[in-house]
């Protein structure tokens, strides 16, 4: 079934004000920094100015003399009292602690923390902490870091390569040998990140009387409470993470485990609540929240008509000084390594390299957007080489509607899609031919104008199959999500989820699907974020999973409650449940609808009238549902084939851009995207995330870069030099929806939290390269900043 | 650290306090007065999350010391609604258009938009983009914000007409 809009739903897919919005517009959101406790102490950081050095002396005497300063803690003390921070790869010799014990490995690494009565005092005192260093050799360039004689970032590990494996899926060599054409190219995705407007913040309070650590954090991290408890050597039951804290944006990076370990330790040591709120410089330099930093070397083999048969891709990822979860971002793209195309064999060689830079963290798409950019760069190059139209080339390569479910060489099966239909729709909406005429007219007037195109997938339903894929010692195949639904004595419905939200509208999601199942107005359904002690298992909103996983969990719990209601009704109507119908919260006899029990009667019976309950039924009306990712649960095969995520959304971008010949500045003048994420639960939310994802992609394509000089200094650290797009840089965007329901999910929904970001950088690069084509120039390196394009254009001027 | 006595009006109410010279207006609002609707995203004057109205003009409260606001009238997001339970037309329009996601930039965005609508009852899309050009939002891509401000302008013009009935989104 393919339709423009879902039918047969009461609430799903309809416009409805998100539940969350009202509290935010009146200033009543409650973010981590808004939680203030009496007697709260504040943390300031002492950081390394060196990219690599041995710490020879720390003297905090002067700092401690300042009135109001409570403590100065350095790496050795903390390392003795805590376990190392979680690592995704099998790297027993790479230890990571929140405060460097002995050796620092990047500029900005935390060396010590100062705790004082106010933040200002703590900062004053931090400047008085004297640290002496003995500089060590460092390495900044990832390819240089791979050389055998490179300065080691972790001497004990023995090499700067954290991970390397060459996967071969299908007859790659034979396909390359048989193909009449090949291309080879390099695509560079420089280091950027999601950089939410709210920095990371955390407040912790240890209560010695109850032996309980309360934590309020702007967190978006799977298994955060467990990881924190383990690092602090506490049982999970002694850590209570308050998931009702509003998170001011994350898109992957809000994983302040090290910050939380620090305040968790300090509050136990000092007996007072302690908070750590990053300032913007802390956030950019030592917040450990940079994104993928990749060098792709790609070869493609294709026929005369441009049909791509095989691909070889080597991806070097510079993960910075420590490996957290970030290196696993090389694994996730395995689940969509051929993009939306019928490429039948692939060799993929992910290489994770450490350098003396800020560590990488998970970023929206978990490595998919850079990979999509690398694939799409090849598609445009092939079109150019063969003289085939870029649209036509994609049409020939796209998987056809009748081929689903479609299994790609790396073992993942794409659930559903109609890529040609979405592409056609967006071409019509954008009026591709008119855009071409506009481009040609601009060129005739002497301007550099280009039209860009990209097609890509958003794997969704976040699973963790990349964990066992890249680390065979990690046998994680479970990545569940849970929800609890109850109806109280007043007849009100309450649903509890077990994670925090960072703008995704989960309360709207849950209330909509529970309302749909129970046929109750979502407006009347309360959704709460249980704290980590009360919550069912959750793996947090990662990997575009919540519409699928939390939506499925909430629907499952509501379905169980509904069957309780039906059982109560049937019992009291002396009928079998199958002989009854449920409508608008009442249960009636199918053959005689006048004989019915209302919602109020059913609720009364469940809560008060045990004598009217069906024998054996539990009193009250409540149910939990915890479910595993559909298609999940299996380990990878020996050759590394695996079902990564279950559902695949598709997007096709069309963009018109002009590049200023003198300054190298790119202006986006028209933007269209065709998007198919199956059934949308709330269209305004899906559209909002897509617009935002495109804006984020515009940043990655044109503006944003964490740039390091050869001495390992981060050039920047403010919004003055790390430029995120404003309302001036983001053009008006038109979204064209299409709906191919997923057969794997409760309502046909797929994920959309990474939408837009996954294809925008590739599309913008395509447009810029189209603009540069008449000059014979090409650039496959992001971001295409004013400086980068200006330099490229200058080479042309010089050549003249 | 020298302390200073200041008196100012915040959201219509007079307030006096003794503050250190180096306390910024945003820290004064948030930490001293517990008006946590005003946020900080950079503390160096670029993101606009800390925007408040100072004598009717949108300013970045991270770049102003509390002592500099002495004698002034400050409006924060908590002071935008007509009463403690309602929403202004602009706030309501933000909900109608889903002009936010995480909500962190929203208070600053609202105050910039509010100031625009005070001076321009029929802003063009360009005017709106210009007015919020100094407010960074990482979530929305701005489209629904622009739509919300345009909707608010339209509603306000209708509300000022004799038979007021708030239009829904076109
Ligand atoms: S916090 Fe004031 S402008 Fe960013
Ligand atoms: S709504 Fe999240 S930053 Fe604007």
Image (tube, coloured by chain):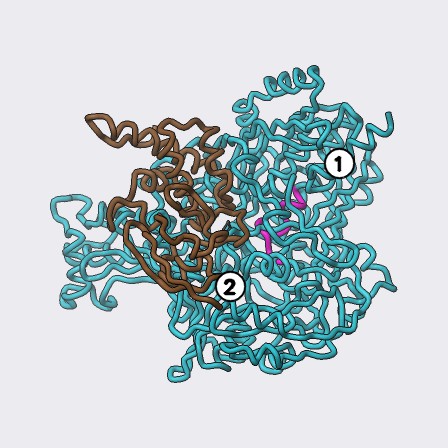
As drawn, which residue projects farthest toward the bottom? Answer: A209
Q: Position of residue A99 (x, y in %)?
A: 63, 73
Chain identifier for the brown-coloured part of the image: B
Nearer the observer: mark 2 or 1; the answer is 2
Which residue bears the numbered disc 1?
A: A779
The image shows residue A540 at horizontal and vertical percentages of 48, 59
Q: Quadrant of the N terminus of chain A?
A: top left
The picture's colour for chain A is cyan
First of labels 2, 1 by sequence position: 2
> Chain letter of disc 2?
A
- Which residue is nearer to you in this view: A93 or A385? A93
Dot 2 beta carbon under 8 Å from ligand 1: no
Q: Is residue A629 above or below residue A781?
A: below
Q: Are marks 2 and 1 in contact (CB under 8 Å)?
A: no
- How far across and down, in percent of the image, does residue A222 sit? 52, 62
Asked if residue A63 is among those painted magenta in the image, a careful observer would answer no
Position of the C terminus of chain A by quadrant? top right
Residue drawn where x is 33% and y is 49% of the image:
A26
The one of A42 and A564 positioned closer to us in this rendering:
A42
Camera sees residue A249: no
Q: Which residue is mark 2?
A: A277
Q: Which residues are magenta?
A: A361-372
Q: Is residue B24 above or below residue A694?
A: below
């Amino acid at each position: 079934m393919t339709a423009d809009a879902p039918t047969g739903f009461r609430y799903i897919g309809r416009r409805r004000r998100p539940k969350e919005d009202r509290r935010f517009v009146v200033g009543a959101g409650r973010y981590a920094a808004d939680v203030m406790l009496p007697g709260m102490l504040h943390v300031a950081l002492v950081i390394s100015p060196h990219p690599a050095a041995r710490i020879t002396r720390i003297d905090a005497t002067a700092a401690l003399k300042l009135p109001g300063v409570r403590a100065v803690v350095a790496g050795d003390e903390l390392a003795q009292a805590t376990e190392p921070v979680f690592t995704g790869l099998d790297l027993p010799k790479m230890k990571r602690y929140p405060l460097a014990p002995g050796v620092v490995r990047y500029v900005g690494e935390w060396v010590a923390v100062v705790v004082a009565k106010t933040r200002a005092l703590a900062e004053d005192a931090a400047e008085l902490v004297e640290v002496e260093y003995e500089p060590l050799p460092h390495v900044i360039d990832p390819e240089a870091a791979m050389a055998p004689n490179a300065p080691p970032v972790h001497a004990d590990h023995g090499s700067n390569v954290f991970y390397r494996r060459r996967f071969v899926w299908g007859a790659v060599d034979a396909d390359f040998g048989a193909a009449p054409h090949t291309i080879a190219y390099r695509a560079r995705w420089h280091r950027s990140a999601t950089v939410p407007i709210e920095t990371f913040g955390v407040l912790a309070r240890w209560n010695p009387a109850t032996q309980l650590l309360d934590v309020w954090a702007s967190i978006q991290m799977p298994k955060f409470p467990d990881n924190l408890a383990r690092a602090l050597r506490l049982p999970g039951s002694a850590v209570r993470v308050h998931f009702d804290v509003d998170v001011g944006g994350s898109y992957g990076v809000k994983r302040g485990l090290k910050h939380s370990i620090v305040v968790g330790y300090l509050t136990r040591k000092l007996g007072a609540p302690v908070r750590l709120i990053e300032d913007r410089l802390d956030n950019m330099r030592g917040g450990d929240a940079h994104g993928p930093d990749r060098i792709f070397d790609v070869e493609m083999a294709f026929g005369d008509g441009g049909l791509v048969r095989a691909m070889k891709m080597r991806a070097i990822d510079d993960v910075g000084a420590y490996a957290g979860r970030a290196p696993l971002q090389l694994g996730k793209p395995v689940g969509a390594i051929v993009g939306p195309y019928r490429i039948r064999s692939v060799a993929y060689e992910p290489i994770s390299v450490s350098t003396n830079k800020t560590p990488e963290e998970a970023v929206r798409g978990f490595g998919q957007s850079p990979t999509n950019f690398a694939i799409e760069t090849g598609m445009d190059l092939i079109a150019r080489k063969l003289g085939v139209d870029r649209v036509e080339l994609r049409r020939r390569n796209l998987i056809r509607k009748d081929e689903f479910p479609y299994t790609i060489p790396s073992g993942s099966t794409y659930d559903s899609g109609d890529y040609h239909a979405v592409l056609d729709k967006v071409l019509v909406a954008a009026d591709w031919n008119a855009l071409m005429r506009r481009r040609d007219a601009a060129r005739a007037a002497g301007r550099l104008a280009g039209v860009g195109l990209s097609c890509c997938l958003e794997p969704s339903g976040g699973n963790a199959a990349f964990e066992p894929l890249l680390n065979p010692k990690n046998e994680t195949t479970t990545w569940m999500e849970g929800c609890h639904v109850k109806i109280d004595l007043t007849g009100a419905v309450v649903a509890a989820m077990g994670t925090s939200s960072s703008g995704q509208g989960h309360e709207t999601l849950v209330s909509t699907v529970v309302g749909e199942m129970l046929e109750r107005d979502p407006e009347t359904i309360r959704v709460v974020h249980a704290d980590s002690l009360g919550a069912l298992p959750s793996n947090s909103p990662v990997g575009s999973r919540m519409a699928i996983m939390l939506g499925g969990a909430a629907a499952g719990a509501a379905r169980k409650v509904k069957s309780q209601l039906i059982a109560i009704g049937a019992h009291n109507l002396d009928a079998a449940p199958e002989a009854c119908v449920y409508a608008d919260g009442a249960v009636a006899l199918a053959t005689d609808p006048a004989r019915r029990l209302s919602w109020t009667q059913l609720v009364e019976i469940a809560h008060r009238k045990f004598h009217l309950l069906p024998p054996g039924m539990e009193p009250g009306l409540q149910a939990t549902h915890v479910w595993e990712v559909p298609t999940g649960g299996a380990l990878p095969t020996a050759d590394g084939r695996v079902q990564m995520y279950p559902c695949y959304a598709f997007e096709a971008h069309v963009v018109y851009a002009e590049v200023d010949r003198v300054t190298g500045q790119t202006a986006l003048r028209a933007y269209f995207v065709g998007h198919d994420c199956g059934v949308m639960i709330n269209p305004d939310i899906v559209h909002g995330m897509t617009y935002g994802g495109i804006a984020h992609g515009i940043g990655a394509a044109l503006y944003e870069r964490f740039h390091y000089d050869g001495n390992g200094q981060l050039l920047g650290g403010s919004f003055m030099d790390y430029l995120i797009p404003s309302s001036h840089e983001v053009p008006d965007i038109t979204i064209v929806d299409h709906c191919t329901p997923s057969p794997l999910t409760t309502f046909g929904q797929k994920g959309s939290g990474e939408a837009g970001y996954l294809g925008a950088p590739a599309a913008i690069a395509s447009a810029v390269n189209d603009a540069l084509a008449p000059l014979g120039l090409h650039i496959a390196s992001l971001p295409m900043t004013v400086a980068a394009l200006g330099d490229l254009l200058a080479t042309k001027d010089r050549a003249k | 650290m020298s302390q200073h006595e200041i008196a100012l009006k915040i959201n219509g109410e007079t307030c006096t306090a003794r503050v250190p010279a180096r306390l910024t207006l945003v820290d004064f609002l948030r930490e001293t007065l517990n008006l946590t609707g005003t946020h900080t995203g950079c503390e160096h004057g670029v993101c606009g999350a800390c925007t408040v109205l100072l004598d009717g003009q949108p300013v970045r409260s991270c770049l102003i010391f509390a002592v500099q606001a002495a004698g002034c009238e400050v409006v924060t997001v908590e002071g935008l609604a007509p009463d403690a339970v309602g929403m202004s037309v602009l706030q309501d329009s933000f909900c109608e258009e889903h002009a936010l996601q995480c909500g962190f930039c929203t208070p600053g965005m609202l105050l910039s938009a509010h100031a625009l609508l005070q001076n321009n009852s029929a802003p063009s899309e360009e005017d709106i983009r210009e007015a919020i050009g100094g407010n960074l939002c990482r979530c929305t891509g701005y489209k629904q914000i622009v739509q919300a401000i345009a909707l608010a302008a339209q509603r306000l013009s209708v509300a000022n007409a004799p038979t007021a009935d708030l239009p829904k989104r076109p």
